[in-house]
Image (spheres, rainbow, N blue to C red):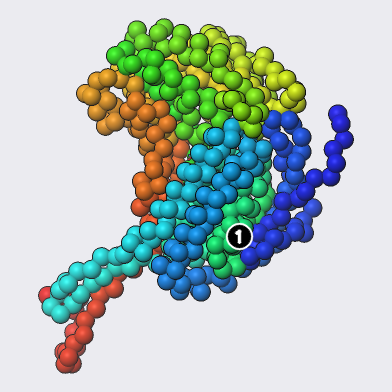
């Protein structure tokens, strides 16, 4: 093993400036394509978290009193800066995460679109008004911010997931403390600096880094009003249970096992093309990746042979290299875990149609590469079906009938995304009605809703009631107040009865 030169440390961003950490615990950030350590990242102690939350609380009154229009204008400038710096952000995402540059740029774009949505906040915060709810009495409702909100995000979308939360929270008048993934924290720091450049007042948006200890300090801090989380299901459950027990509003988006149901009448070439992108794009490290195909009847052999040919042709390499379609996994541990599932699939008796374990990328022997992997004739009891693998491993299950396929999807404990491939409007309509999943695609493999809709799953893929961005996002980051008003011009008789506003 070669010795590496000292690498930079990623600071925190607190109260409008970079802050060095006092604590001793830290993690390493690697370039996933080479395995080299490129940065270290300090883990915030409860004291660091408290300092960030205190600054965010101090910044809240003035930010709440900044008019929605002025808040929106800062976000408009932030949006333009994101656009200008999209390439720089994408390069950092590719370096730390591994996904291709085009894919990373796409994720910046999807985050930017939430900022665009949030710039409409003066309209979105409008309440309702009713005249004459009683004689001479009117009522109106307003939406008011909560205070300090916390965001905790996963490694697989280091810029997009923070953007699902922070722009909406800030536009609504909240201040924010973000704890991004410690595996790829740099994109969040770039966002903090761009918000600062856009004119966001100090203390309104803050970033601390860390692991469970840092997260738990946020979940239990008395001055944190709400927590948005995106990550795996066990941690989402922990976040939901801990933060709600501490009186906070919580939306915790969890893991997934997303199924595509392929019916015999589908355009099978188009379906195979779509499934290759959905299963192996970003090395399968997408919460909306298709990781299970349920092939109905005679679609089975036909779709497996088409996916096999295409999977074997996917170009694997460093994400920054021109022409590469699939990059490495996030860490050595994750690579070993995913490769371990391929072993488990073989042991369970599934047909290993394409094996990605042998992939070598010349000049990148220490990178975390695994090639596209395809299993056929997988059954619901096998670990490769039951568990979220979060890598480039696609499993195919066979179903005799459409009803059986729907039943398989609905019995799965996750419910994030799903898709049906068919030419039948009737079959598609039934699917969209009956399927127990939050986001559904019809001949669309990764049905990620646009920023003006809300994003979120059902069942084990979501703890809490509201999804992120769209109208749910505005609801999550505000409290409703209803005001009842009258202006009597003469004294009225005292009454101790329940007022009925006639
Ligand atoms: P993760 O759950 O390991 O980590 C998510 C965040 O929680 C990170 O910031 C991490 O530091 C923190 N964390 C980790 N362990 C913790 C613990 N024990 N206690 C408190 N905090 C902890 O997830 P990940 O590996 O970073 O991301 C991949 C997972 O995220 C997958 O399961 C994927 O499906 C899911 N994901 C879901 C969505 C969605 O919209 N539902 C979107 C993206 C990713």
- Does the image show residue 120? yes
In the drawing, does residue 329 fall left or right of residue 429? right
- Could you say which is closer to the camera, residue 447 or residue 241? 447
Q: Name the residue under label 1.
A: 206
- Does the image show residue 403? no
From the top left corner, tell me how far across and down residue 226 is, in percent.
49, 58
From the top left corner, tell me how far across and down residue 348 is, in percent.
56, 12
Q: Which residue is drawn at 71% across and 61% down?
A: 19
* Local crowd size for mark 1, using a 10 Å CA cut-off: few (<14), some (14–19), many (≥20): many
From the top left corner, tell me how far across and down residue 48 is, in percent.
69, 60
- Classify 465 as above or below 224: above
Q: Residue at x 75, y 46 (%)?
A: 40
In the drawing, does residue 436 fall left or right of residue 333? left
- Could you say which is closer to the camera, residue 134 or residue 192? 192
- Classify 258 as above or below 168: above
- Classify 250 as above or below 283: below
Secondary element under disc 1, as helix, strand or loop, is: strand
- Classify 401 as above or below 181: above
Q: Does the residue labelled 1 lie within 8 Å of ligand 1?
A: no
Q: Quadrant of the N terminus?
A: top right
Quarter of the view holding residue 487: bottom left
| Quadrant location, ligand no. 1 | top right
From the top left corner, tell me how far across and down residue 76 is, in percent.
46, 59
Q: Residue at x 36, y 64 (%)?
A: 122
- Could you say which is closer to the camera, residue 359 or residue 324? 324
Count of numbered labels shown in the rendering: 1
Residue at the far bottom in the pictured view? 490
Q: Which residue is drawn at 29% across and 65% down?
A: 127
Quarter of the view holding residue 81: bottom right
Q: In which quarter of the image is the C terminus?
A: bottom left
């Amino acid at each position: 093993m070669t010795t590496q030169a000292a690498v930079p440390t990623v600071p925190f961003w607190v109260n409008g400036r970079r802050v060095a950490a006092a604590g001793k615990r830290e993690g390493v950030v690697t370039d996933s394509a080479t395995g080299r350590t490129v940065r270290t990242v300090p883990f915030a102690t409860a004291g660091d978290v408290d300092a960030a939350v205190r600054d965010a609380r101090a910044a809240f009154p003035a930010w709440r009193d900044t008019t929605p229009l002025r808040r929106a204008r800062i976000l408009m400038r932030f949006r333009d800066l994101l656009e200008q710096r999209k390439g720089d952000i994408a390069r950092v995402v590719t370096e730390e995460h591994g996904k291709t540059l085009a894919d990373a740029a796409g994720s910046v774009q999807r985050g930017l679109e939430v900022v665009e949505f949030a710039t409409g906040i003066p309209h979105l915060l409008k309440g309702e008004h009713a005249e004459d709810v009683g004689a001479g009495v009117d009522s109106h409702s307003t939406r008011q911010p909560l205070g300090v909100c916390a965001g905790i995000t996963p490694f697989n979308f280091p810029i997009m997931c923070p953007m699902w939360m922070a722009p909406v929270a800030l536009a609504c008048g909240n201040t924010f403390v973000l704890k991004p993934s410690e595996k790829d924290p740099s994109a969040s720091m770039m966002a903090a600096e761009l918000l600062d450049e856009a004119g966001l007042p100090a203390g309104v948006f803050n970033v601390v880094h860390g692991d469970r200890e840092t997260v738990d300090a946020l979940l239990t801090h008395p001055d944190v009003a709400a927590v948005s989380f995106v990550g795996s299901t066990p941690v989402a459950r922990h976040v939901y249970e801990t933060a709600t027990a501490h009186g906070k509003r919580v939306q915790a988006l969890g893991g997934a096992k997303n199924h595509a149901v392929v019916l015999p009448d589908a355009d099978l070439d188009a379906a195979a093309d779509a499934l290759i992108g959905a299963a192996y794009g970003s090395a399968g490290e997408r919460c909306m990746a298709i990781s299970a195909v349920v092939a109905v009847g005679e679609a089975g052999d036909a779709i497996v042979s088409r996916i096999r040919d295409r999977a074997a042709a996917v170009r694997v390499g460093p994400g920054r290299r021109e022409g590469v379609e699939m990059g490495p996994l996030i860490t050595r541990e994750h690579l070993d875990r995913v490769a371990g599932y391929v072993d488990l699939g073989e042991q369970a008796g599934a047909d290993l149609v394409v094996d990605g374990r042998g992939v070598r990328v010349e000049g990148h022997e220490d990178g975390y590469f695994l090639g596209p992997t395809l299993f056929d004739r997988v059954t619901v009891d096998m670990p490769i079906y039951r568990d979220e693998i979060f890598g480039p491993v696609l499993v195919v299950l066979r179903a005799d009938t459409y009803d059986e396929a729907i039943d398989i999807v609905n019995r799965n404990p996750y419910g994030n995304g799903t898709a049906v491939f068919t030419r039948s409007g009737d079959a598609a309509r039934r699917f969209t009605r009956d399927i127990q999943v939050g986001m559904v695609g019809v001949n669309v493999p990764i049905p990620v809703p646009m920023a003006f809709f809300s994003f979120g799953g059902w069942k084990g893929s979501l703890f809490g009631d509201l999804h992120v961005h769209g109208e749910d996002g505005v609801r999550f980051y505000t409290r409703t107040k209803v005001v009842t008003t009258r202006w009597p011009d003469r004294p009225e008789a005292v009454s101790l009865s329940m007022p009925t506003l006639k």
